[in-house]
Amino acid sequence: MFETALNYIVTALEIVGIAIILLGVIKTIYMFGWCLVKRIRISTVMTEIRIELSNYLVLSLEVIIGRDIIETFLSPSLNDIIILVVLVLLRTLLAFFLNFEITHMPKKTLDKALEKK
């Protein structure tokens, strides 16, 4: 029974992670399209669009890492633990570099992008 509940939680977290990615992609496509309709130069809002998408990707990576940890509790073989460690390491590095890119943008560009929110 407990294992069945955890399987449902794993599936739900997987769906939530994918939904977050899709929502972020849809929102950034909408932002891009809005710029085209309003004839705004994409280069002036590209930083804001990148920040928006990066935030969604980082959030989804965290949810998916949580899903992987719970899934490993269900079948803790040595092979599954090694795969989990590699996946968590790769996803953590990806999240780190996405955050690094956002926080190390030129200050003026980042401030201008955040003012519009």
Image: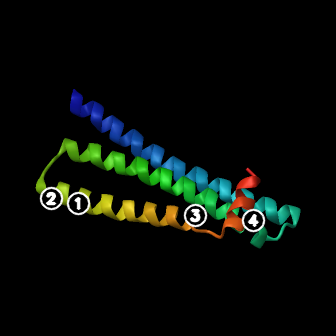
Counting residues from the N terminus, which is met first, the one under dot 4 or under dot 2? 4
Q: How far apart are labels 1 and 3 at the CA level?
A: 29 Å
Q: How far apart are labels 4 and 1 at the CA level?
A: 39 Å
Q: Is residue 113 left or right of residue 24?
A: right
Question: Which residue is at the far left?
Answer: 78
Image quadrant for the N terminus?
top left
Q: Which residue is mark 4?
A: 45
Counting residues from the N terminus, which is met first, the one under dot 2 or under dot 3? 2
The picture places residue 68, in percent across and down from the top left corner, at: 31, 49
Q: Residues within 10 Å of mark 1 (few under 14, many from 20)?
A: some
CB within 8 Å, label 2 to label 1: yes
Q: Which residue is mark 2?
A: 79
Q: Nearer the viewer, residue 65 or 100?
A: 100
Question: Which residue is at the far front?
Answer: 107
CB within 8 Å, label 4 to label 3: no
Q: Residues within 10 Å of mark 4 (few under 14, many from 20)?
A: some
Q: Which residue is mark 3?
A: 102
The picture places residue 75, in percent across and down from the top left corner, at: 17, 46
Q: Which residue is mark 1?
A: 83
Please give the name of the residue rendered at 45% of the width and 45% of the height, measured from the top-left corner: 15
Q: Nearer the viewer, residue 22 or 40?
A: 40
**Amino acid beneath label 3:** Ile
Q: How far apart are labels 4 and 2 at the CA level?
A: 45 Å
Please give the name of the residue rendered at 60% of the width and 59% of the height, measured from the top-left corner: 53
Counting residues from the N terminus, which is met first, the one under dot 1 or under dot 3? 1
Q: Residues within 10 Å of mark 3 (few under 14, many from 20)?
A: some
CB within 8 Å, label 2 to label 3: no
Question: Which residue is at the far right?
Answer: 38
